[in-house]
Image (tube, rainbow, N blue to C red):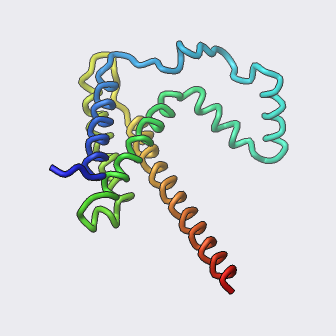
Amino acid sequence: MKITKFRIFAALSVLYAALIFYLSSLLSINISGDCINISGDYFKFPFAYKVADFLEQHSMSFIIDFAHYCYYNIDKIEHMALYFGFGILLYLTFHNSKYTVLRKYAPIVAIIVGVLYGMTDEFHQSYVPGRVSSTADLLANGIGVTIAQIAILILIVIKLANMKRRSKDQDDEQD
């Protein structure tokens, strides 16, 4: 059996999905709360007040709102981060497939598979004692997979622009 990029990324995707399943099986996951042990307002430091004032003065208070949301909903950020990694692996898996349609539509297929897996993950969590299945978690999972695809597409566009610029520079040097 020949080892291909597709098989490697498919195996990594399955292992990552198994990791997600395992984490969903745990009674309680507290990655952020006890380890960091932050209590109260997150603007404890004078520097943070200065940053907040700067953002408000420059009509960027939405960043403060986003930071506030993230602080009080850290579990959603954890879901997004976990599914961001899953989304990257899914893209690499489908992008290296032998099937043209999977390669061509790798970002879309990755989002569909990632969201479907997120649905099964939330369904699974509903049967784990002490865990709760929620649409907010499912939304965070989908956002994580989608942001991964957007990031990959941005990197592809940047790479193509750099290749075009290098090609143009080489043509200019030859003239």
102 relative to 4, above or below:
below
Q: Quadrant of the C terminus?
A: bottom right
Residue at x 67%, y 16% (from the top left corner): 40
- Total marks placed: 0
Question: Is 92 located above or below residue 31 in the figure?
Answer: below
Q: Nearer the viewer, residue 41 or 144?
A: 144
Which residue does the image show at 37% across and 53% down from the upper left?
91
Q: Position of residue 126 (x, y in %)?
A: 27, 27
Residue 23 falls left or right of residue 156: left
Side of 63 relative to 8 (left or right): right
Question: Outermost residue toward the front?
Answer: 174
Closest to the observer, 10 or 47: 10
- 14 with respect to 79 (left or right): left
Instruction: Give percent across and percent down for residue 56.
Output: 80, 40
The residue that appears at 30% across and 49% down in the rendered structure is 113
Instruction: Determine the residue located farthest toward the left in the rendered image.
Output: 1
| Horizontal relation, residue 19 to residue 57: left or right | left
Q: Quadrant of residue 28?
A: top left
Percent across and percent down for residue 67 are 65, 34
> What is the quadrant of residue 158 in the picture?
bottom right
- 138 above or below 146? above
Residue at image x 28%, y 35%?
Answer: 15
**Residue 31: % across, % down:** 48, 20
